[in-house]
């Protein structure tokens, strides 16, 4: 079975069906040419028009919605928090890191 190819406008509509928010066509083209967080939306250029496979749209949405690697980030934050507590003392307690104002 061949995968259906979508124009950027159709791909934006597909994003809207999946996420509930339809991105602008220029966003889809930017995702194809520049990418998001190091990953590009796979596409081919045919006759001056970008074409994106429906399965590639689905996979790209999964990637973007997954967010940053939370377990790696949480571990890194814990190490930095421990270092700051060691340097600044127990009164620091991560309150600045959690977004509280001093």
Image: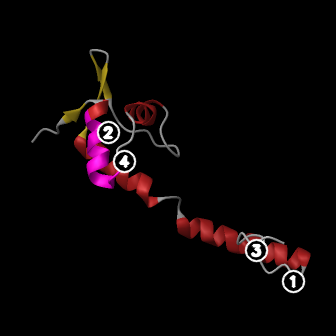
Q: Earlier in the sequence, mark 4 or mark 2?
A: 2
Q: Is residue 49 magenta?
A: no
C-alpha span from label 3 to label 4: 33 Å
Residue ID at (86%, 78%): 86
Residue 20: x, y in percent? 32, 53
Query: Dot 2, crowdedness within 10 Å: few (<14), some or many (≥20)?
Result: many
Residue 80: x, y in percent? 75, 70
C-alpha span from label 1 to label 4: 43 Å
C-alpha span from label 3 to label 1: 12 Å
Q: Earlier in the sequence, mark 3 or mark 1?
A: 3
Label 4, secondary structure: give it: helix
Q: Which residue has dot 3 on it?
A: 81
Q: Which residue has dot 4 on it?
A: 60
Q: Earlier in the sequence, mark 3 or mark 4?
A: 4
In the rendered image, the quadrant that contains the C terminus is bottom right
Q: Are marks 3 and 4 in contact (CB under 8 Å)?
A: no
- Which residues lie in the magenta part? 10-21
Q: Which residue has dot 2 on it?
A: 12
Residue 88: x, y in percent? 90, 76
Q: Earlier in the sequence, mark 2 or mark 1?
A: 2
Residue ID at (38%, 41%): 23
Query: Quadrant of the rendered structure where residue 99 is?
Result: bottom right
Residue ID at (32%, 39%): 12
Label 2, secondary structure: give it: helix
Nearest the viewer among 30 and 75 is 30
Q: Are marks 3 and 1 in contact (CB under 8 Å)?
A: no
């Amino acid at each position: 079975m061949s995968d259906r190819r979508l124009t950027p406008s159709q791909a934006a509509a597909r994003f809207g069906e999946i996420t509930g928010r339809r991105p602008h066509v220029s966003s889809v083209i930017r995702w194809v040419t520049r990418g998001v967080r190091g990953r590009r939306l796979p596409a081919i250029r045919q006759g001056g028009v970008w074409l994106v496979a429906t399965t590639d749209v689905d996979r790209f949405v999964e990637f973007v919605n997954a967010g940053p690697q939370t377990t790696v980030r949480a571990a890194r934050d814990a190490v930095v928090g421990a270092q700051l507590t060691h340097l600044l003392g127990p009164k620091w307690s991560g309150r600045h890191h959690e977004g509280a104002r001093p």
